[in-house]
Image (cartoon, helix red, strand yellow):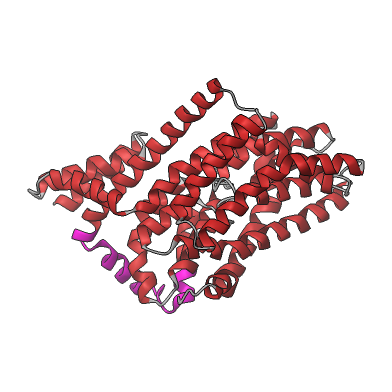
Amino acid sequence: MGLIVFIIVFAAVFAMGYPIAIGMFVSSALYLLISHIDLSILMDMMAIKFESNFVLLSVPLFIFTANVMNAGKITDKVFNLAQDALGSLKGGLGYVNIVSSIIFAGMSGSEIADVAGLGAVEIKAMMNAGYDGAFACAVTSASATIGPIIPPSIPMIIYAAISGASVGYLFLGGFIPGFLLGSAEMLMVYILSKKRNYPRGKRPPFKQFINSSIKAFPALIAPILLLYGIYGGVFTPTESAGIVAAYVLILSLFVYRTLGLKDLYKVVIKTVLNTGYISFLIGCAFALSYVVAREEIPITIANAFMSLGLTSGKWMILLSSNLLFFALGCFFDVSAIQVVIIPMLIPLVKAAGIALVHFGVVSTFNLMIALDTPPYGQTGFITSAISGTPLYKVVKEMLVYWIPLEVATLFVCTYIPDFVLWLPRMFGYGG
């Protein structure tokens, strides 16, 4: 009876348009009441799980870092350097867009932060140079997908907290898939630039390139500091997040002097709001996990997979999981999918002998593609609003060119695990 009420209430709250976190909290609370279980367990689950997941502290720090870099115009310095280096190629601003996203990926860990901050600069520059709005929006959305794949990555941190996988190894596992996706996107820019005769920018004077390099150099230290801290054994991932957050704040306030106290106040408020939503969502997911474990739902899902013939091997499990994540990602928030679905799949993944790091990178990759895919596709809405380009034109460009490219790259990383696991194994990973 408790489980039936739990499912009905969860679905009803969602159907009424309330945030999915509210649905998880209310349905879990009612389940406990109907099952005659003390409600204090609900709060204990949320508090104890948070306390035992020290790595979750890095999430607000990376959110803060991304917000500071956007407000402090650090992203502009990165974009200007990439533009001076690659802008003179045919379709050069398309390459600049992708390279800038790769660099920014090593600082923010968020696809939405990339689109909303750096993306606004990229789209404006591309449209001013004569590129059509749909292409500018689509390449910005596609390149932003790289953000949470190349470390740091907020979705990977959440996955690590849920699955128990190592954050450091997950970050290492994202490097090759991220660069592989970036390379594939550059190839697409080359093809479309030739086909559509996109413009070639002027080659800047060497002195201008040197000036751009000098201005961007302090910003480029941030990802180096982060990665050296983690893989040099100097800091934990959480400590590294704190160091990088402090570093970009000092850059914005005292080196570039692009961030005032009023701007900093807005950044802090925005970070608190973002963190509050994610923290409440994860806390409610911990409560939900209690209900899921008590009702043995993972076992039920595993049996359902077996009855449908979806567990005939690890490759079939990966395929069905990819299809599930992609379908859900078209309609729901990434974090919500992670905290609800991944705990149910982890036992099945372990039983099949799939490395948790491999599954974590693949699932993150998949959910980032979903952010580009209608009807939920947030990146399409954001880039359309930034550029003034009709949404249907952006969606058409994404569906015809960029999403198939992303799916093909995901397929390679799914079925050739060494693309994900080679680097982690070089650093001692045994999965």
Q: Is residue 4 left or right of residue 92?
A: left
Query: Relative to residue 290, is residue 359 depicted above or below?
Result: below
Depth check, front residue: 342 or 355: 355
Asked where in the image residue 210 lies, by quadrant, the reply is: top right
Q: Is residue 328 visible?
A: no
Query: Relative to residue 4, is residue 249 depicted above or below?
Result: above
* Rendering coords of residue 425 (x, y %): 53, 75
* Rendering coords of residue 256 (x, y %): 67, 32
Asked where in the image residue 115 lies, by quadrant, the reply is: top right
Residue visible at 59% across and 47% down in the picture:
107
* Rendering coords of residue 2 (x, y %): 15, 50
Q: Is residue 93 visible?
A: yes
Residue visible at 75% across and 42% down in the picture:
135
Q: Residue furthest top?
A: 262
Q: Is residue 1 magenta?
A: no
Depth check, front residue: 113 or 310: 113
Depth check, front residue: 128 or 154: 154
Q: Which residues are magenta?
A: 293-318
Quarter of the image containing the C terminus?
bottom left
Q: Is residue 296 magenta?
A: yes
Q: Magenta stretch mostly in which secondary structure?
A: helix
* Rendering coords of residue 217 (x, y %): 72, 45
Q: Residue furthest left?
A: 36
Q: Is residue 124 left or right of residue 89?
A: left
Residue visible at 54% across and 48% down in the picture:
109
Q: How many dots with numbers?
A: 0
